[in-house]
Image: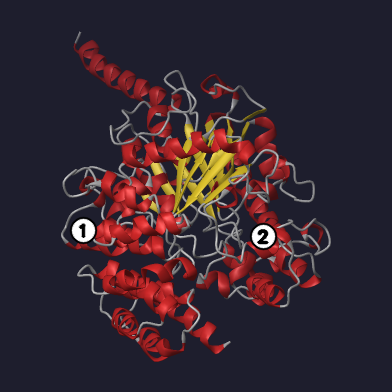
Amino acid sequence: MKQLRLITPLLIVFLGLACTLCNAQSKPNVLWITIEDTSPQFIGCYGNQHASTPNIDRLAAEGVRFTQAYSTNTVCSPSRTTIITGVRTFEAGTGHHRSKNPVPDFMHGFPYYLQQKGYHTSNNSKTDYNIVNTRKYTNNAWNESSDTAGWWNRNPGQPFFAVFNFNDSHQSRTMSMSYRFYKKNVWDQLPDSDRIADDAFPMPPIYRDSPEMRREFARVYNSIKLTDNRIGELLKRLEADKLMDSTIIFFYADHGEGMPRGKTNGIGLGYRVPFIVWFPPMYEHLSPWGAGLITDELVSFEDLAPTLINLVGGEVPEYMKGRILLGSERSKPAAFLELSSDRSGNGIDMVRTIVDGRYLYSRNYMPFMPEVRYIRYMEIGKIKKIMRHDFAADKLTGIQKQIFAPRPAEFLFDIQADPWELENLAYNSDYDAIMKTMRTRLDSCVIQSRDVMFLPEYELAAIADNHTNAYQYRLDLDKYPLKEIYAAASLSGKRGNEIAEQQVKLLRSDNKIVRYWAALGLKSQDAATLMTYKEAIIQAVQDTYLPARITAAAVAYDVFADPESEIVLKKAISSTNIHASLMAINYLLYTVNKTPFTQVVQGVLDGSNNPGYLKMAAEDFLSLVDQ
């Protein structure tokens, strides 16, 4: 009897432990494979017969390949903010590249919620989350985040969520760094049989087909080939550890191709990414699409966090508004997506985009800058230098030349018929009905999401300095009267006397952000139109709100050579407020007479406490003065 009493508790403990292990092992493992700066046009399974990507192609052939998958932003750190938080950057206030703005304390990195369900979470190893206190945020989200992290460090029987970030296709390899760097880090890492020659692929029509351009563009193909090899090595390790049959695999890129007109640019070439989900037979029932199929269902990075939390049995937080893609609780497919592109590096910009799978509509709020605007880590690349040389020598044609001109206020592309986005349909009367639908959707989305990025970065930084976060700030209707602000912002980029007249009237608004947008809108008007309003614009140079004053001064200096505006701009450039300085230098990059500002901009470059992206703006400016 005593022996039975002793055995019974042990038996209960054993059975309980066995049950726990059984339940843990019944949960799917999840492997995320992320790559850098890659558009689907350069992956074999997406139709490129000249690419060599057998490992990615195998995942697609056996899994589900998405043709309409989009990053929520066009550059790495903002896109990763959405991935880790499940919140779009224009709601979180994290749209500017490496801006380091705070998010609310309740907004955990989503792997935190997987940990609560017993998962081992590992990140190998890129973070770049674009928020303050990145180390604290990382430690909260991951059991381990390092270049040695992986599923192999979990407890026996513990389900895992493991992320591996491969940077071999990053822009540093494909264009920004020297050819010598590329040769060492890509070319020399490939066996002879894997190397792709300069003449082994067609040049995208957005670039001139010349031997010099081919030598540079071959870097894209070889970098992606090396990436595919790395993926193959990882999959072999997963298979050797006998985990393929229990692991769901996600594969995607963080945004579009890291080449001119792709990454940083608010069109499909900046947003659209390759995206594949592979299911082992054990978990094929979770796929609503089956296996070995292609879907045109719209997905964005906003969907990743809620999908993973739901997949492991967690409760999706209310602040996550993305779709659940898998399983019995999956959300209904989206009719369209709202995407955004803001400052990248030193290059300011603001684009908002609606895509429905057939048409992509982009609204350019700062179209005085071309598609290939000045961004230093682009400008240092040999391929960009060749493009600028060919443009100056009048060797470019059609779209190759057009991308150096100021943008129109609106783009509309048929991305099915025109994947390289060569023909802008926005001003074709045959598409008036589609344009009306897209405009209405965009306007509605901006207001509904309370897009906080319509504040100048100067203002977002002030919010952060006051120990507040933009996510919650934007919800205060009194502090952030978005409808009033957007009425002014929605004029920006539109051209002509009728629009300019409205913008000049708004220069006298009681709302400082409205006055900023009125001045910014005038920056896209032509000089002949602005001559009528010279007195009002020069008067606006005295505005009490610094961003409005700087922007009005940029207009008045460029168009009227106003001496007071020159003084205002010089003071802004040398200001201790980095956002005021960055704003002024960026405006001057697109101003004809730069010479008076050389000395003060040199001071920015020499300043030891200035951040990298401000110094890059100064380098861009000084390089133009030297030409």
Residue identified by numbered label 1: 463
The image position of residue 576, as x and y in percent, is 25, 78
Q: Which amino acid lies under the numbered mark 2 shown in the image of this protein?
A: Ser
- In the rendered structure, find residue 223 and report the number of the disc placed on it: 2
The image position of residue 264, as x and y in percent, is 51, 58
- Residue 294 seen in the current view: yes
What residue appears at the point 24 percent right and 11 percent down from the top-left corner?
Answer: 4
Whether 281 is drawn above or below 127: the answer is above
Q: Quadrant of residue 406?
A: bottom right
What residue appears at the point 69 percent right and 74 percent down from the top-left corner?
Answer: 386
Viewer-side residue, 128 vs 150? 128
Q: Quadrant of residue 320?
A: top left
Where disc 1 sits, the SS reads: helix
Structural distance between the alpha carbons of marks 2 and 1: 41 Å
Residue that protrudes farthest toward the bottom in the picture: 599
Q: Which amino acid lies under the numbered mark 1 shown in the image of this protein?
A: Ile
The image position of residue 260, as x and y in percent, is 61, 63
The reply to whether callout 2 and callout 1 are in contact (CB within 8 Å) is no
Q: Quarter holding the N terminus?
A: top left
- Residue 93 seen in the current view: no
Viewer-side residue, 567 vs 175? 567
